Amino acid sequence: MHINKNDQVLILSGNYKGRKGRVLKIFPETQRAIVEGVNLIKRHTKASQKNPQGGIVEKEASIHISNLMVICPKCNEATKVHRATHTDSVKGNKVRVRACKKCGEMLIKST
């Protein structure tokens, strides 16, 4: 997948087109992702110990990853992601990393 958790992404289509957000969760089997503050839905919830009030809760729903584009942290633009080989400075091994198609900067997976 070209998108990972905690990536900054741009929404390409739909009601939230043009908005930016951070990826909260990825569902690889269905090719969907939950983006912070995007595709909000309302759910009626019963009162529980975790939520003693109950009522209507607004939360994010998933969006298909084909509608998302990664924003490069260096050039701060939406870009395609490609796989590049990088030589590890410590061990000298070749490692495949995600990189920005425009500026070539490595996209580090943040946790």
Image (spheres, rainbow, N blue to C red):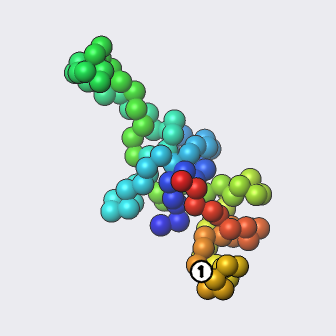
Crowding at dot 1, Cα within 10 Å, few <14 / some 14-19 / many 20+, comes out as few
- Left or right of 51? Residue 65 is right
Tell me residue 38's x, y (percent). 50, 38
Picture residue at 66% right of the left edge, 86% below the top? 92
Q: Residue furthest front?
A: 90
- Residue 99, picture quadrant: bottom right
- The amino acid on which the numbered mark 1 sits, given as a three-letter code, is Val
Q: How many marks?
A: 1
Residue 63 visible from this viewpoint? no
Tell me residue 10's x, y (percent). 60, 49
Tell me residue 103's x, y (percent). 77, 67
Q: Residue furthest top?
A: 53
- Left or right of 3? Residue 27 is left
Tell me residue 30's x, y (percent). 34, 59
Is residue 70 depicted above or below 57 in this figure?
below
Picture residue at 58% right of the left edge, 43% below the top? 21
Of residue 86 and residue 75, the one placed in the foreground of this image is: 86
- Residue 19, picture quadrant: top right
Residue 72 visible from this viewpoint? yes
Residue indicated by mark 1: 95
Of residue 7 and residue 48, the one placed in the foreground of this image is: 48
- Left or right of 11? Residue 61 is left
- Left or right of 60? Residue 11 is right
Is residue 73 depicted above or below 102 in this figure?
above
Picture residue at 61% right of the left edge, 85% below the top? 93
Picture residue at 51% right of the left edge, 48% below the top? 23
Mark 1: which secondary structure?
A: strand
